[in-house]
Image: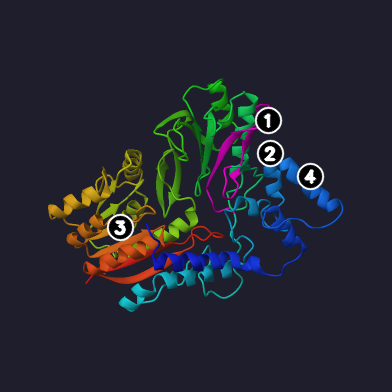
Amino acid sequence: MAESRAERRARRALIEATEGSEEKKPSKKSKSSQDAKGKAKAKHPGSRRNEDKASHTRSKRSHKDRVSSARKAVDPKSPCSIMKACGGCTALNRPYKKQLAAKQAAMEELFAALCEREGISVDPIRGMGVTLGDPGKYPAPRGFRHKAATPFAPGKEGTVRCGFFERGSHRIVAVPECPVEVPGARQILIGIAREAERLHIPAFNEDKHLGLLRYAVVRCGWRTDQIMVTLVTAQRDLPHAQEFFEAVAALDPHIVTVAQNINGRPGNAILGEETRIVYGAECMRDQLLGCEFDISPTAFYQTNPQQTELLYQLAIDGMDLRQDDVLMDAYCGSGTIGLCAAKEAQNKGIGIMLLGVERNPAGIADARRNAELNGLTRSAWFMADDATDYILDAADNNERVDVLSIDPPRAGSTPEFLEAACALKPRRITYISCNPVTQERDLHQLLDGGYRLLKITPVDMFPHTDHTETVAVLERR
């Protein structure tokens, strides 16, 4: 599909924002960094040239040496030792205020036509601990990712390599510590690799489709100290399996769940269809906006919980819930948004009915358990169904929905869903998006269907990246 003008504008603005600081002051250090990235060849005479040639020769000999070469691509004064090689936090060296300003400019450009049509402006972006425009010193966000993952790959003599994929490749870069992950998560992942080596559990070779251990995912609670580990293996049976699972559980005293997910299919998808608990509880528990949530190994749960509370509160404020409202939470996942909204309404003495729809059965099971945890079983119903199919049926049957909450995947919603949403005529629609480009497209259809855009607020869920999430609030005309 051809890229739209809005997509090109947004992408161009974000690229300029994140890469602009790298175009300053060429020096020997920046030249060296470019050499290591392959953008230029070393031309210094003497021993330095010989070292570069030797490094280039070694990089052809083994994957491990290629990784070592990639790590040399970094300014040693960087806040992350592998920033250039990893490519995840492209703006980590950029002041946070400038990051927010760049994202704000990108969102204003993307939503310019909508804002002009509705006579509004994009709200100032909400960063971590600061809103753009606030006076004073801005923070440098660290340790906010409460989910960490690694691929595994075989090394020499039975070793197991772990870390991140190098930018633009499937070569693994070793990660001693990640400054944006919650402290301790990366050490658990490294410990899993060491235990696999000790017990001779081979890492998966994605080229040859041989080996057993493919990925590991660590999720850490924010308001709780609980940790859940999911091990992804190419098949169910492992050598020394029980000893391995117990050794993984012993890596941190806060680990409450170890799960095994079996994924033998080729491709880049991390998780397969089968998951079983091999140690501890079925779920870990965390809290958001005063609600408790059980999170199962395969259920969706936001990675940055601090900003998730902000994101959800913006949506809840936009719902303007009233007594006896019917709130439909589409793409509800584990029920987090709808249950937080229902709990806040309950605390204010407002009784509503919550209806959640999610196609992932594991998410619906979590949502029902979470409704019970928060004392909302009598006022919350959750259905495992495709959101578009469900809302089409609801529109055909003239079902009542007063407030509609939408939080679709990156592809956005579907024209059929949005058409049915307009047919239901909810008083308010809140639209949370992890991809503002597809949200901008969808909002035009909602406006054409009888709604007006009250506000749109960007939220910085992942500092140091080009990613921005947005909350749009719409009202029936």
The residue located at (41%, 47%) in the rendering is 292
Residue at image mark 2 = 64
- For the residue carrying disc 1, how many other residues have a C-alpha within 10 Å: few (<14), some (14-19), or many (20+)? few
| Sooner in the amino-acid sequence: mark 4 or mark 1 | 4
* Colour pattern of the rendering: rainbow
Q: Position of residue 367 (x, y in %)?
A: 33, 44
Q: Quadrant of residue 443?
A: bottom left
Q: Position of residue 303 (x, y in %)?
A: 48, 50
Residue at image mark 3 = 405
Tell me if label 3 and label 2 are in contact, CB under 8 Å. no
For this rendering, which residue is in front, 171 or 417?
171
- What residue type is disc 1 on? Lys
For this rendering, which residue is in front, 186 or 16?
16
Image quarter of the C terminus: bottom left
Residue at image mark 1 = 156
- For the residue carrying disc 3, how many other residues have a C-alpha within 10 Å: few (<14), some (14-19), or many (20+)? many
| Sooner in the amino-acid sequence: mark 1 or mark 3 | 1
Image quarter of the N terminus: bottom left
- What residue type is disc 3 on? Ser
| Helix, strand or loop for disc 2 | helix
The residue located at (39%, 74%) in the rendering is 112
Q: Position of residue 188 (x, y in %)?
A: 60, 38
